[in-house]
Amino acid sequence: MTSRCILQTALLVYFSTTVLAMNYNLLRFQLSSSSVECQELLLQLNGTSKDCLKDRMNFKIPEEIQKSQQFQKEDIVLVTLEMFQKTSDIFRRNLSSTGWNESIVENLLATLHWQKEHLEEILEDIMQEENFTWDHRTLLHLKRYYLRIVRYLKAKEYSVCAWTIVQAEILKSFFFLDKLTDSLPN
Amino acid sequence: MLWSQNASPLRSQNLCFVVCISLLSGVLSSLPELSDKSCTFKVTLRNFRVILSWEVKNHSIVPDHYTLQYTVISRPDGVKTVEHCSNITASFCDLTDVWEVLPETYAVTVDGFRGNTTLVTCFVDFFLAAYISLEPPEFDIVNFIDHINVNVNFPPVLPKILEELLQFHLSLIIEEQSGEIVKKHNPVLDENVIGNFTYVIDKLLPNTNYCVSIYFMPRNLEAIRRSPVKCTLLQPARDTGSSESARIGGIITMFLIAAVFISTIIILKRVGYICLRNDFPKVLNFNNLSAWVFPEMPPLEAVAFVEVIHINRKKKVWNYNYNDESDSNDEATAPLTSTGGYTKHGLLSGLPGPTSASSATGQDCLEPDTEEPNLSELEAESLMAPEPSPRLGKLLQDRFSEDGSSTEEAGDKIIFNVNLSSVFVSTLDDDSDIPPVLPSFPEETYDLEDSHTLEPSFLASGGEGTQPPFPTPSAECPCPEDVLSDKNDNSESDVDIGDGYIMR
């Protein structure tokens, strides 16, 4: 009886880790795909910064994200989820001054939402099956980063130049998100 | 720097990129052109250099020199003038050592002058990582008998932007084509790759034409720009060496295949899986129809016919009464025959009648004879045993003692001489009046006139085969213990004379 229980538990753990391993490979692929698509959509949003150089601002993306330091795979999931979530929140704000194609914006929001949902599911699985310490410091820096962007938009009253500057900043953040995703283990 | 080659395919994740991204958003290289109303720009990685080129749209406006300035969008930095791109006549600028950050949106201004007159001002801002076009590097190939060396010249010192490009943004693909077969090789490049490096494409067929092409594949799957194809014909292999060894290898391979095949056939045959035996036994051979229709009679078994002969014999009673005067009616006297004859020993009068089952069955065996039941028992026992049984001896002793006749001492054995050749088994026969045919026993005499007494009949052998004249243990005079159950059954059904054997 005991040996059977141990065997069943061992099998469950083995297959769970196997499934999670397979999910991380799939997650890497999905994240990369979503990131590339979001970048393509952002690049299609027309606009120029010729008259907006005076509105530039250094939002100071966290150094942990820029340098792509070694994260645990669970932290990568959490960080990417935060980035997709906050980006989606930003582009749901007042875009009326930009004159951007609404279908492109809707596609962008749909991609962000889909990837966010998938990351939330994986995060739930991680929280149920594994016990680890989250990197709260990186997450806090990330939250502050996006908060600065939101405050900037509010301060600039969602002007076209402000959105142009934010557009460039979000493109940069997705580049670093790609590097984070690429560091997910096999 | 020599890179070993294992014909490694594309990384699976890159392959997935190609498939999935293509499905999701079609052609991803549909980015807006870098241009403004006056100029068209293009940023290219050419021979590991970041080159920004431009072209004035209005061909009627032809500046004689240009000046390039730039700034970044992510920081509120000032506009910077590129010194080596000021007052240049060329319409391109090498910005490899100027732009160090790949993930950056650069805002570029190009002023076209004729003399001191600004003829045109062009402005463009673009995200460098997305818009940089990767031209394939220059390379050359060196062919050998069975491999090709692909030499790519990397710069002796990698610029910072190139480090980031090679580390993350792009991968180098070497395509090898022979006929319709295309193989892709993906050597891993890191930030330490510098100078000339050689990639070896091995395991090639001698005396075969191969074409090689290389290109960078960007991560964001922008349009791939392949290098011009370079083809070469490999040198033929030496006949003495490789061809002979190939021939020997082929012969050995054929031999091994044949050995495996033959051994498999042998094993299957021995197991019985194939080539089942069809040599049936003769009895299962139905080809001989006549033998089938007219089967041969099995050989007859040796049969011995036995004829039961009933002999009415006068019993010879041995009178144990030594008193000359006594003349009991119960007595039966019989002459004592000589040895070799049948002798019956009678019992004295007054002896108890048959009380035991054995005595009764003993009668059944011999022939029911009410006159001398006790004697029948003794006879039966004497007939069955060449040696007197202890029970017989005791019985006789007891009877002698009762009568007061001369007895032997208690414990003395009474020995009967029994001629085994004359042991008979009597049977009940309906035709008891018919005198049996006697075998040749010259020493015996029989009285056939007395029909009241029935002598035990004996088995006469006749016919084919021979039979011993005395019963076999299977036929029977039953042993006394065996006949206990037949005590009251004196019917003729006890005797079965079928097949020449007497059985009970």
Image (cartoon, coloured by chain):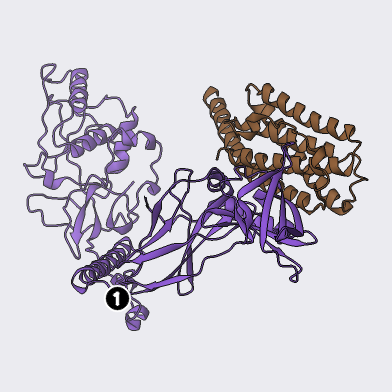
How many callouts does the rendering have? 1
Q: Position of residue B104 (x, y in %)?
A: 68, 43
Residue denoted by label 1: B296
Task: Kindly identify the amino acid type of the residue bearing the numbered disc 1.
Answer: Glu
Residue B343, above or below B172: above
Left or right, B450 with respect to B491, comes to left
Q: Using the rendered view, name the quadrant where residue A15 is placed.
A: top right
Is residue B137 visible in the rendered structure shown here? yes
User: Compared with residue B114, is residue B384 higher up or lower down, i.e. above or below?
Assistant: above
Query: In this picture, is B160 found above or below B94?
Result: above
Residue at the spot 30% in from the left edge and 38% down from the top edge: B363
Q: Work out whether residue A147 or residue B79 is closer to the camera in this orientation and state it.
A: B79
Q: Compared to B66, does A120 lie above or below?
A: above
Q: Using the image as rendered, state which of residue A49 and residue B397 is in the foreground.
A: A49
Q: Nearer the viewer, residue B470 or A100?
A: A100
Q: Nearer the viewer, residue B141 or A121?
A: B141
Query: Are there few (<14), some (14-19), or many (20+) residues within 10 Å of tag 1?
Result: few
Colour that chain B carries in the picture: purple
Residue A68 location, x and y as percent? 60, 34
The residue tagged with tag 1: helix, strand or loop? loop
Which picture quadrant has residue B398? top left
**x and y, in percent, of residue B490 in the image:** 38, 42
Q: Tell me, by letter, which chain the rendering colours brown.
A: A
Left-right relation of B394 to B282: left
Q: Measuring 91% from the left and 36% from the top, which residue is drawn there?
A: A157
